[in-house]
Every structure is written in structure tokens, then in C-alpha cells.
Image: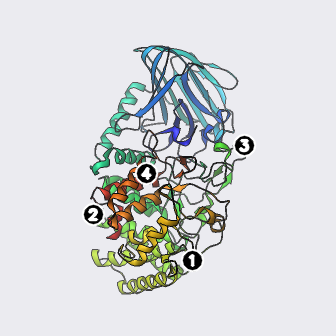
């Protein structure tokens, strides 16, 4: 299956990918970043999956949708025998995590098959399976999964299977629950009540969303996806639910995105506040403050969902990868990189929280001052940049712009909120950085800012120059940069991060990847700022057309293969959708906030 063939369900602590064929091919328990018990997504069914579908040879068609305003997925299978609906959901936790799968008879009498292949630790460990108290129990190491259902099951070749049929008006339910193997399994839950409570939870949450103009449905679905990618106990929002879905099919640009990036902080805060979700914005702000607490010199670009710092990267040789895209990586070595832009994102996030009236914390301003003092001595150094290059450090223009943002938001925090600080000092440094960028980051011959000092290469991150308020959109240097990006970094109407032919020399990896969807949303914002609203709307609607049938986006889009690429669903892409929709709807969106 393709990436877009998957749907996403979750309980705001972990999530699963469900294929349109009724197979759950990815699930990590009990947390997003735990080892997967179903890893067929990155291999095949031998690496674990949970499939429910019409008996072999009987499927004619399928269709699916989310229940309105929820993360409850419904898939309908239809053949000559009849039609059934498969309902999949993960109830928000009041105890142990569970997946509920209910098959409802819609027409006729359909024969179906259930196959449960549990393989703990990313598809590598076959559990010990036994029947106990009318349930099926699978145990290996620290993990235990318990399957409860009223239909008969049996073991076949280390697989739990069930052949059953469902008539019109009947239903069959399966409940799979995780618990630590050293504890007694929890009691059975009432699946009907659990589904009802799950629906009520999501509809209450989505019902609080502020209107967002002409694209209400797309924004609502993106906000639900963003909520689904939230780790509720801490408020952290991870970048994606998966690891190692490729940016290039068959290539090695495969990364673990089950962590929280500081770079996403400002964009995410804008999206949540604009939609009216202040509690979630406060929780995200508080997660950020806890995660970065400590020495400013030890600030990381990303953290675990509870604020963990050690995200050691390693490879899983037994998994061949999605469509043979190897290696499969766990952890992320970029967590140890030096990236200047995150300082600007952190300061911008706290400044925006103050503007929105989120109750301030004294600790936040003290921490910001520590970051500013560190940045004062480090902003001139080369770094790995926004794209986390694994090659040589460079003087990236975007990094310097975001260092300017840090100083700018510090000055505005002092001036607008009566905070104590050396405004004169930060103003002077703000001007020094601005002059440095304009002198060294701009190529007069090309008529554009460039990716790094002294380079001729372009970079889509330069779109942040007007969006961050560094220079106005009317500035001829900004206009020239916008025109150059449209001329050199666009394919099929979408935006590459940087030119594919330059990628090997820039990031030290084999060339080739898809267009980066957040950059395309940034371009739409810039076009709108430039007074080119019809073009901005056209680009935005073309981006909406890239969503799968469930309204989900990944990180990238392959313009040659005409399909989604990269980890999925991707929070950064959905945040871009929300913010651009609000801007185009003449409401406060990301670009307007940043210009402020």
C-alpha cells in the first residue's frame, strides 16, 4: 500500500495506522515512541499486523471516512455476499491503552477473517500466546497484549486467527489491550460504551474550534490530527506518528519523527490559539519550558514527548523498510546538532503566548534571558541549519534571520510587557545581526538572498524573511528572493526545500526527495502578503488536493510518482494548512502573527 492508503487513530498517548484493507500495520505501545508491536508498515505481515477483512477472494470494493468531528475511523467492505462496516478507535485513556474494532453488518451475510500477528520490539519478538479466562494473552519481556472477543479464535503458524460471518444488523467486536507483563491484565471494558465515550470526547473537543472561513472542514480535520499527535500527559506534540517513512522511495532519507521539535513550537502555538484551543497552547508552552530547562548551552533542537534528551539513533537491520527504503532508524542523531534558528523559535513562541494573554511564568523570562546571553556569543558560528544537514556546518542565512528574531522578540517583550531586561543591548545586537544578514546573505548578482553566506544556492526557508518580519514583502530584495524561489525551486507548482541536484553537497546524503509541504504553505503566505491573493488561494487549494481521502498529509509529496512521501501524518504540514487557511480567510494566521 501507499502512504496515503493509511488512516490514523489514536488516544492522545499513542497512535496506529490502519490501511484501507483493514490491516493495522503500525502501532507502538504504550507510547508513541515505544517499540512497535505491529511493524508491517516497515516490512511485511511477518513483522506484525492486525487484519480484519472479507474472506480471501471476496472483496469487491471498500470506502472509508472518519465520523464527523472525531478520530473514529469507519471502513466499509462490500462484495456479492453483502456489506459490513469496520469501526476502529482508541478510547482516551482511563486505564490501559486499548484498540476497539467492531464489525457491523450492513447488508447480506459476509464471511470475514481476522488475523492477529503480534511481534514486539519492532517486529522482532514472537510472544508466548495462551488462552486465559476466555481471552487470548500474548506475553514477551515487559509487554502483554490481551485480545477479547466473543467469536472463536485459534492459533495458526504463530498467528491468532478467526473465521466468522456477520449478518445485517449483527456486530462482532474485538478489543486488544496492553498492560505490563508483570501485572495482572485489567478487566474487560464495555466496547459499546467505550466507542460512545470516544465519540463524545472528540466531538466535544472539535466542537470548540473557531470558524476558519472557507476551509472549515480541512482545518477541523487538521486540528483533530494535531490533537491526535499530542501526548496528553505532558502536552508535547510530536512531529509524526511514524519512523523511517522515506522522503525518497528506495533511498536512505528515513528518519524517526516520533519526537517534539522546538522549531514547530511557534507555528503550533499559532495554530492552536487561532482555533481557540488555549488549554492545549498552554500545555504546549509548559512542555516547552520544562523540556529546555537547564543550561542554555545544552539546548537541543528536539526532545522526547516527556522531555527526554537522550534520543540515541540506531538501525533495525531486520526491517527492510517501506518499499525497501533502508535503513529503518530509531532515535534521531539530529538531537545533538547545533541549530541557531531554534533560539528564535523559542523566543517567538513565548512572546506570542504573552500577546495571546496566556498567563506568564517568571521562569520563562529568566530562561529566555539565559538563551539570549548564550546566543549573543554564538550567533556568528556556523550550524547545521533548519534542514538538519549531516554534512559540513555552514553560515545559513535562515539561521541568522532567526537569531535576529530572538533579539527582536526579546526587545518587544521588554517594551510591550514591561519585563526587566537590557533592551538597549538587545536592540544593538538585533541591528548588528540584521546588517550582517543583509550584507552577507544577499547575492546582488542573483538578486536574491541565498541559502548560506557566499553561496548561490536558494533555500525555501528564505520565505521566512518577510513572514518573520525581518524585511517587508515590499522590499526589492525580498521580491527578488520570492521570484527566484518560484523560478528555481518549484516543480509541478510546489516547493522544494532546496534544489534536488544540490542536495548531496548540502546535506551529505544521496540526492533526491519530494517537495516539502510546509514550504509550499509558506509560499502561499508570501504570495498573499505580496498582494497576489488569487495565486495564493490557487496554491493552497492545490495543496489541499494532496490530502488523502481522510484529510491527512505527510511531510512531502513526490511530484514524479504523484504520491505522498515522508513520515505520516505530519504535524508540521497540518499546522501549515491551518495557519495558511486562517490567513487567507482574513483572520489572524501565522504570517500575520509573525509580522507582529
Which quarter of the rendered picture does the C terminus lie within? bottom left
- Other residues around mark 4 within 10 Å, as few (<14) / some (14–19) / many (≥20): many
- Which of marks 3 and 4 precedes in the sequence? 3
Q: For this view, does 596 lie left or right of residue 295?
A: left
- Callout 2: SS: loop
- Element on which disc 1 rests: loop
Q: Which residue is mark 3?
A: 318
Q: Position of residue 469 (x, y in %)?
A: 37, 73
- Please tell me which of labels 1 and 2 falls first in the chain: 2
Residue ID at (38%, 44%): 221
In terms of image quadrants, where is residue 74? top left
Q: Can you give x and y, in whole percent of width and height, for residue 394 in the image?
A: 60, 75
Who is closer to the viewer here, 19 or 282? 19
Q: CA distance from mark 4 to mark 3?
A: 36 Å
Disc 1 crowd, CA 10 A, few/some/many (<14, 14-19, 20+):
many
Q: Residues within 10 Å of mark 3 (few under 14, many from 20)?
A: some
Q: Residues within 10 Å of mark 2 (few under 14, many from 20)?
A: few
**Which label was assigned to residue 357?**
2
Q: Which mark is residue 543?
A: 4
Label 4: element kind:
helix
Name the spot of residue 328 as percent of width and height, x first: 66, 49
Q: CA distance from mark 1 to mark 2?
A: 36 Å
Rendering quarter of residue 76: top left
- The residue beneath circle 1 is 395
Disc 1, disc 2: CB below 8 Å? no
Dots 2 and 4: beta carbons under 8 Å?
no
Q: Are marks 4 and 3 in contact (CB under 8 Å)?
A: no
Q: Residue at x 29, y 51 (%)?
A: 212
Amino acid at each position: 500500500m501507499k502512504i496515503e492508503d493509511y488512516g490514523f487513530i489514536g488516544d492522545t498517548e499513542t497512535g496506529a495506522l490502519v490501511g484501507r484493507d483493514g490491516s493495522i500495520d503500525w502501532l507502538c505501545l504504550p507510547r508513541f515512541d515505544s517499540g512497535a508491536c505491529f511493524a508491517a508498515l516497515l516490512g511485511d505481515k511477518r513483522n506484525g499486523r492486525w487484519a480484519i477483512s472479507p474472506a480471501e477472494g471476496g472483496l469487491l470494493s471498500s470506502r472509508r471516512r472518519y465520523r464527523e468531528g472525531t478520530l473514529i475511523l469507519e471502513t466499509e467492505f462490500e462484495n456479492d455476499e453483502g456489506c459490513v462496516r469496520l469501526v476502529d478507535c482508541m478510547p482516551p485513556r482511563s486505564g490501559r491503552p486499548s484498540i476497539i474494532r467492531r464489525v457491523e453488518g450492513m447488508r447480506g451475510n459476509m464471511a470475514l477473517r481476522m488475523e492477529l500477528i503480534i511481534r514486539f520490539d519492532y517486529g522482532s519478538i514472537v510472544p508466548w500466546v495462551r488462552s486465559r479466562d476466555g481471552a487470548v494473552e500474548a506475553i514477551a519481556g515487559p509487554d502483554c497484549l490481551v485480545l477479547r472477543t466473543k467469536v472463536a479464535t485459534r492459533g495458526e503458524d504463530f498467528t491468532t486467527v478467526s473465521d466468522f460471518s456477520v449478518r445485517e444488523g449483527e456486530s462482532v467486536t474485538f478489543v486488544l489491550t496492553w498492560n505490563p507483563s508483570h501485572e495482572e491484565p485489567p478487566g474487560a471494558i464495555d466496547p459499546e460504551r467505550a466507542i460512545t465515550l470516544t465519540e463524545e470526547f472528540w466531538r466535544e473537543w472539535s466542537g470548540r474550534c473557531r470558524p476558519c472561513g472557507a476551509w472549515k472542514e480541512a482545518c477541523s480535520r487538521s486540528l483533530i490530527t494535531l490533537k491526535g499527535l499530542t501526548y496528553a500527559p505532558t502536552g508535547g506534540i510530536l512531529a509524526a506518528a511514524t519512523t523511517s517513512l522515506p522522503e525518497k522511495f528506495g533511498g536512505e532519507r528515513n528518519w524517526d519523527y516520533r519526537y517534539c521539535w522546538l522549531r514547530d513550537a511557534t507555528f503550533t502555538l499559532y495554530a492552536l490559539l487561532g482555533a481557540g484551543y488555549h488549554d492545549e497552547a498552554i500545555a504546549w508552552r509548559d512542555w516547552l519550558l520544562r523540556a529546555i530547562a537547564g543550561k542554555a548551552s545544552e539546548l537541543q533542537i528536539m526532545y522526547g514527548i516527556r522531555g527526554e534528551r537522550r534520543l540515541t539513533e540506531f538501525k533495525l537491520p531486520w526491517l527492510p523498510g517501506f518499499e525497501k527504503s533502508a535503513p529503518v532508524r530509531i532515535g534521531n542523531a539530529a538531537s545533538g546538532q547545533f541549530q541557531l534558528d531554534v533560539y528564535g523559535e523559542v523566543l517567538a513562541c513565548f512572546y506570542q503566548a504573552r500577546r495571546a494573554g496566556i498567563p506568564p511564568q517568571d521562569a520563562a523570562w529568566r530562561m529566555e534571558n539565559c538563551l539570549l546571553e548564550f546566543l549573543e556569543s554564538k550567533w556568528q558560528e556556523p550550524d547545521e541549519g533548519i534542514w538538519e544537514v549531516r554534512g559540513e556546518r555552514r553560515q545559513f542565512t535562515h539561521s541568522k534571520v532567526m537569531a535576529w528574531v530572538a533579539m527582536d522578540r526579546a526587545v518587544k517583550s521588554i517594551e510591550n510587557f514591561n519585563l526587566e531586561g537590557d533592551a538597549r543591548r538587545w536592540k544593538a545586537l538585533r541591528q548588528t545581526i540584521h546588517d550582517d544578514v543583509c550584507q552577507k546573505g544577499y547575492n546582488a548578482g542573483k538578486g536574491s538572498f541565498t541559502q548560506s553566506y557566499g553561496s548561490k544556492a536558494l533555500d525555501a526557508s528564505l520565505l521566512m524573511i518577510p513572514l518573520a518580519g525581518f524585511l517587508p514583502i515590499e522590499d526589492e530584495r525580498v521580491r527578488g528572493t520570492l521570484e527566484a524561489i518560484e523560478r528555481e525551486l518549484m516543480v509541478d507548482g510546489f516547493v522544494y526545500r532546496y534544489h534536488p541536484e544540490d542536495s548531496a553537497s548540502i546535506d551529505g546524503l544521496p540526492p533526491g526527495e519530494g517537495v516539502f509541504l510546509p514550504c509550499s504553505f509558506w509560499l502561499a503566505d508570501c504570495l498573499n502578503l505580496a498582494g497576489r491573493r488569487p495565486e495564493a488561494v490557487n496554491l493552497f487549494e492545490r495543496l489541499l488536493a494532496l490530502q488523502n481521502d481522510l484529510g491527512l498529509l505527510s511531510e512531502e509529496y513526490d511530484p514524479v510518482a504523484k504520491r505522498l512521501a515522508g513520515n505520516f501524518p505530519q504535524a508540521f504540514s497540518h499546522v501549515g494548512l491551518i495557519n495558511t487557511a486562517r490567513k487567507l480567510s482574513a483572520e489572524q494566521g501565522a504570517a500575520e502573527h509573525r509580522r507582529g
